Image (spheres, grey):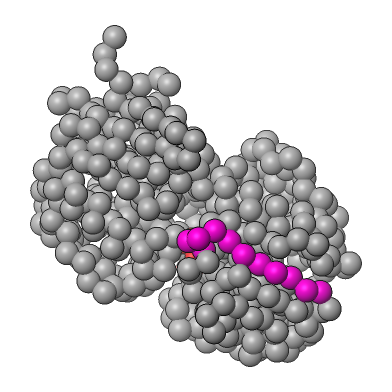
Amino acid sequence: MSTPIVTVASNEHHQDLCVAPPVAGVALRGRIRVPGDKSISHRALMLGAIAAGETTIEGLLLGEDPRSTAACFRAMGAQISELNTERVTVRGLGESGLQEPAQILDAGNSGTTMRLMLGLLASRPGAFFAVTGDGSLRSRPMSRVIDPLRSMGAKIWGRDSDEFAPLAVRGQALTATRYDSPIASAQVKSCILLAGLHTDGQTTVTEPAKSRDHSERMLSAFGAQIDLDPDTNGVTITGGATLQGQHVVVPGDISSAAFWLVAAAIVPGSDLTIENVGVNPTRTGILEALALMNADITLENQRDVAGEPVADLRVRSGELTACELGGDLIPRAIDEIPILAVAALFAKGTTKIRDAAELRVKESDRLAVMAAQLQAMGATVAEYPDGLDIAGGATLTGAETDSHDDHRIAMSLAIAALRASGKTTIHRAESASISYPNFIETLKTAIGEVS
Ligand code: S3P
């Protein structure tokens, strides 16, 4: 029997993922599926919880983040069935609204859970809420949602001059507002829209570049009045609508497909199809970036599923060229910059990533962490306040690396390891389960190593 390429060593706290490709390399081939979209999963649970009647969800992501959302809304009275991918049922609270929970709401590692939920809590008159998260989330900025909510009259307090969780919220009847957000952030936009849903009048959010629009699409499908202004990237919600439960079909997450797109693009001999991937144009920056790098990717079987565009993505390995990534493209690829940095290592020339300072306030400081971990494998990466320069044509050597408890870092390093010589160990690799519970099994399948 040949030596396994992918192995896992666990102790009671952490998991080490080891990747040791053979000298001849290991191609990725066949057809795979990725788990449900994380952003859509959160929104389906939340809108289902506040809608009247029943919402059913097909294809829900079973990662830790949506589990945090489900736990928070259960604590506020929503009846959510056991989570599974086939069919989750949510009995919404409708007119009666969210109930004051007798416990602290714990958003875990999930910025989306915390920030979107705050819009709903702040606009729930009379109820008190305490909200916290894990160590990473408690160090992520919350003033970006607290400030605009306060401009609507919200009563919210937090640690360190109201910047960080734990947070306390006393729900109020709010006043409609227009908020010109200085950052392109779907979490900020969605928070304010959800506050506006329960506020008389029209609440508008504009942003400097268009961020993912799943909230707008789903709010509309559940019966809210949503108006768009493409000139300002503006979204207006008219308050007062009662949402009606819907059937939601969650497509595969393009942010999870991104690891396989890059893996198959950089590992010679690969030809991989990822089925059923959401290709909403506010999320396809990874495809645009890989096209700029001359990657061979085709969209097959394009269709619309429950209001979201979906396709099968076929990727074949080939020569990549360096490119410059910045501006409006960054919000469309915000979670894919770490794996794009891996692609850049194997392109001809130096790839420059700019306008990506937001990465410093994600689950980890993704610019600093990626630079350090790839350097440990022998890469030449220069760090800038808002980006990275990545030298292509890299020769990577297997090394001891660390995910810093960041799911997207863990998975990006596992893909880089497929092109390194010798063994790479990724410490704290269990973080992958935040967004991709069976990542390791799919990695084994794609390289033909049945687990
Ligand atoms: C998300 C928005 C993005 C993204 C996150 C999910 C969402 O965050 O990074 O993983 O579901 O709204 P920002 O809005 O902070 O950019």
Residue drawn 64% across and 38% down?
A: 85
Q: Position of residue 305 (x, y in %)?
A: 60, 48
Which stretch did the figure color magenta? 127-137
Residue drawn 15% across and 40% down?
A: 397
- Name the quadrant of the N terminus: top left
User: Does residue 281 sit above or below 277 in this rendering?
Assistant: below
- Name the quadrant of the C terminus: top left
Relative to 449, is 222 on the left or the right?
A: right
User: Does residue 363 sit above or below 202 in this rendering?
Assistant: above
Magenta includes 129?
yes
User: Does residue 394 sit above or below 270 in this rendering?
Assistant: below
Residue in the foreground of this view, choosing between 445 and 159:
159
Relative to 48, is 192 on the left or the right?
A: left
Q: Position of residue 7 (x, y in %)?
A: 35, 27
Residue in the foreground of this view, choosing between 190 and 5:
5
Furthest toward the front, the residue is 12
Residue in the foreground of this view, choosing between 366 and 50:
366
Q: Position of residue 74 (x, y in %)?
A: 77, 54
| Number of marks in the rendered image | 0
Q: Position of residue 174 (x, y in %)?
A: 74, 85
Residue drawn 76% across and 61% down?
A: 103
Magenta includes 222?
no
Question: Can residue 346 be spotted in the picture?
Answer: no
